[in-house]
Amino acid sequence: MAVTTQQLIQWKQQARPIVVLTAWDYAIAQLLDASGVDVVLVGDSLGMVTLGYETTLPVTLEEMLHHAKAVRRGVQQALVVVDLPFLSYQESPQQAIHSAGRVLKETGAQAVKLEGGYPAMAETVGRLVKAGIPVLGHIGLTPQSVHQLGYRQQGKTADAGERILGEAIALEQAGAFGIVLEHIPASLAAQITQKLTIPTIGIGAGSDCDGQVLVTADVLGLSQRQPPFAKSYVNLREIITQAVTDFSGEVRERNFP
């Protein structure tokens, strides 16, 4: 049975942790799905991982659609969620509906993710949900606001924590099926997780969230730089470099084929 948004909410009620990883192409998506990952996120982090940008800001909707189509072709069981990139949804609810509609229509993905829980964004989420588009929220450190927030931990003061909690409640009321909590204190994430009936997916937000997400390139040791909350389970940069060096040596010494 393929994973659904309703199932994620049930898993929260059952205290069954939710596993989320990112994908950017068919091969990685296929491997994640075969490994039993619950949610495959086509994150705009592919801007750095795949396209070589410094931040997520330059990523276009067309680029997200291109990668999401490839990912979707590799997934049979997991729920596929696609990030709406910077300036593809912030202008108006109409723009958001158009962009999100294209994602579902053209890629076959089942949901979209967008950043922010301030009043105008909560209203946009409500409009998307009413249009039949499932939405995963994202609050705390929001990478599309890098020039405003940097990559610092968010919600460290009482006021900032109250604001983030308020955003989480607003997104749930707007109809989001879950919320990513990025780089906030574990105590705040625990408080939000307890308050909501929809699942929280943590990234650098402690162990009390209903699920965890990481960028797959970080997990596989493919990234040049790791965020402080990531964990590498293998060093593929080293393994791939060694394999290519060995192949190159054999070709140059005429030992291959």
Image (cartoon, rainbow, N blue to C red):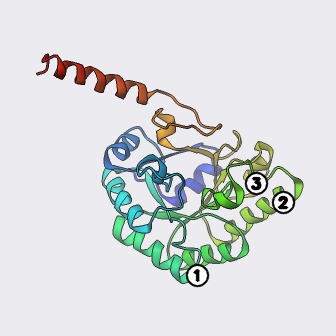
Q: Is residue 40 visible?
A: no
**Would you name the residue on which mark 2 appears?**
162
- For image coordinates 68% across by 46% down, the residue present is 209
- Classify residue 168 as left or right of residue 227: right
* Residues at marks 1 and 2, CA–CA distance in whole angstroms: 26 Å
- Reading the chain from its start, which is encountered first: label 3 or label 1? 1
* Residues at marks 2 and 3, CA–CA distance in whole angstroms: 10 Å
**Would you name the residue on which mark 3 appears?**
192
Q: Which residue type carries mark 1?
A: Ser
In this view, the residue in front, 170 or 118, is 118
Q: Which residue type carries mark 2?
A: Glu
Which quadrant holds residue 102?
bottom left
- For image coordinates 37% across by 47% down, the residue present is 29
* Residues at marks 3 and 1, CA–CA distance in whole angstroms: 27 Å
Q: Which mark is residue 92?
A: 1
Coordinates of residue 67 in the picture (x, y in percent)? 37, 57
Q: Are marks 1 and 2 in contact (CB under 8 Å)?
A: no
